[in-house]
């Protein structure tokens, strides 16, 4: 494990000419074996609250492919669920909360509910006992969790939340601070259970524009400051030009989305993960192979590069093409 190229890359110290790779949502609905397990549960939370099943779903992509890291199969909405929100996942619509701040409901912030998250730590321990690659623990950023509890579902436009934040900045920050406290305990719990590194998903940070540092990055920085500095923490700030904020954070590992230009970042003393458009895996075989070759050629000399997508693998991606890409990368890596 100490020799893991993934963990070395997170410290900008991967000098082995080996490109480590894993994918956002590497488990999920593009895999038939995932769909078979998912069909046994009517409720997504019932599924992720069963540690044996989380473990099985985490292992599925590792059995199928050669990957350099595992990510605990779970979701970023475990925290609001534990704090008292009733959440269901509706096919074609995504997550739906019973109550939403935009409808005048009070946010559910029952912090005693933290104890309900033990299932994630149990799953983490179980997964760790079965894998020989690093395990990534994760959480949503406080801002991104706030967005879901505000809208009660995946947002379609952002005017309402921008109005709310402008009118009630202090109330917004109180809610964000509560999510921050719980997230720190949650991530520490995952580390104690065996996670080797962490990723924070700020999927909706991009809607904040000038307010990004005040309403999102500040709280992610509080999380970073509370976690053992030896534990690498990767920030995924979708829709943000994170370059503009590098001086405002101690975080030094970033998962870029596909709209960023990775070449602006790669020569900096930070680790860069991501940036591939997952739709690229649906191209012709030759193009998929060329993608792997191009990545190896460009980045295998970089000590700070991790191959990954810029957003999660979606159900329309052909798992065989993903396999083709990974196989070619593996051959190049073992040269
Ligand atoms: O393999 C992995 O990457 C680990 C598992 C994982 C899931 N969700 C499983 C999941 C991770 C890391 C997440 C993170 C997550 N969840 C994010 C951040 C990343 C991003 O994409 O921006 C967000 C915003 C969520 C919230 C969420 N969970 C949404 C919007 C949805 C519906 C998505 C959809 O495709 O309909 C989920 C449900 C969810 N989480 C699924 C999976 C595999 C699909 C549920 C199903 O099978 O019914």
Image (spheres, grey):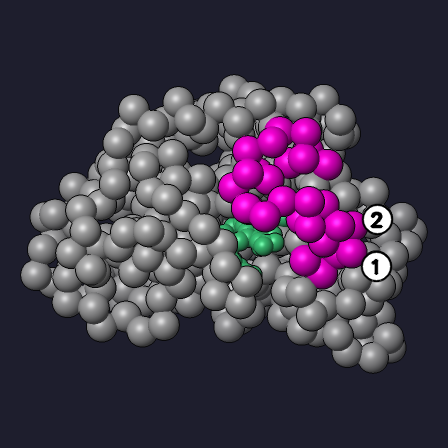
Range shown magenta = 29-56
Instruction: Say which quarter of the image contains residue 313.
Output: bottom right
SS class of the residue under badge 2?
Answer: helix
Q: Is residue 300 above or below residue 187?
A: below
Image point (59%, 60%), residue name: 312
Residue 294 in magenta stretch? no
Query: Which numbered dot is residue 64?
Result: 2
Mark 2–mark 1 CB contact (< 8 Å): yes
Image point (28%, 70%), residue name: 158
Q: Residues within 10 Å of mark 1 (few under 14, many from 20)?
A: some
Q: Is residue 179 left or right of residue 192?
A: left
Residue 114 in the image, given as x and y percentages of width and height: 36, 27
Q: Is residue 265 visible?
A: no
Foreground residue, 304 or 100?
100
Residue 155 in the image, given as x and y percentages of width and height: 36, 66
Q: Residues within 10 Å of mark 2 (few under 14, many from 20)?
A: few
First in residue order: circle 2 vs circle 1: 2
Residue 237 in the image, given as x and y percentages of width and height: 43, 57
Q: Is residue 51 above or below residue 272?
A: above
Main secondary structure of the magenta stretch: helix
Residue 42 in magenta stretch? yes
Q: Is residue 322 left or right of residue 161?
A: right
Query: Which residue is denoted by mark 1 in the rendering?
Result: 323
Q: Is residue 37 above or below residue 284?
A: above
What count of labels does the image hold?
A: 2
Residue 166 in the image, given as x and y percentages of width and height: 11, 63
């Amino acid at each position: 494990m100490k020799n893991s190229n993934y963990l070395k890359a997170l410290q900008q110290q991967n000098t082995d000419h080996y490109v480590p790779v894993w994918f956002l949502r590497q488990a999920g609905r593009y895999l038939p074996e995932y769909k078979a397990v998912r069909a046994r549960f009517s409720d997504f939370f019932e599924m992720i609250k069963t540690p044996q099943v989380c473990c099985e779903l985490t292992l599925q992509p590792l059995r199928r492919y050669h990957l350099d890291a595992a990510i605990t199969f779970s979701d970023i909405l475990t925290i609001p669920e534990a704090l008292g929100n009733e959440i269901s996942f509706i096919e074609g619509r995504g997550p739906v909360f019973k109550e939403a701040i935009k409808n005048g409901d009070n946010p559910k912030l029952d912090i005693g509910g933290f104890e309900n998250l033990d299932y994630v730590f149990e799953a983490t321990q179980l997964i760790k006992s079965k894998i020989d690659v690093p395990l990534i623990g994760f959480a949503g950023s406080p801002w991104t969790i706030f967005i879901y509890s505000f809208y009660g579902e995946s947002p379609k436009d952002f005017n309402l939340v921008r109005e709310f934040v402008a009118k009630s900045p202090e109330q917004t920050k109180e809610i964000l601070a509560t999510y921050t406290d719980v997230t720190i305990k949650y991530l520490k719990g995952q580390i104690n259970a065996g996670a080797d590194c962490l990723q924070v998903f700020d999927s909706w940070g991009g809607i904040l524009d000038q307010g990004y540092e005040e309403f999102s990055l500040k709280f992610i920085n509080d999380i970073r400051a509370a976690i053992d500095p030896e534990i690498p923490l990767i920030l995924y700030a979708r829709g943000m030009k994170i370059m503009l904020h590098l001086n405002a954070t101690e975080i030094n590992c970033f998962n870029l989305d596909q709209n960023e230009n990775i070449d602006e970042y790669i020569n900096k003393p930070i680790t860069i993960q991501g940036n591939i458009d997952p739709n690229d895996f649906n191209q012709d075989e030759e193009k998929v192979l060329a993608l792997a070759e191009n990545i190896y050629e460009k980045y295998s000399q970089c000590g700070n590069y991790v191959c990954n997508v810029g957003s999660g693998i979606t159900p329309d991606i052909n798992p065989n093409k993903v396999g083709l890409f990974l196989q070619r990368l593996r051959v190049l890596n073992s040269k």
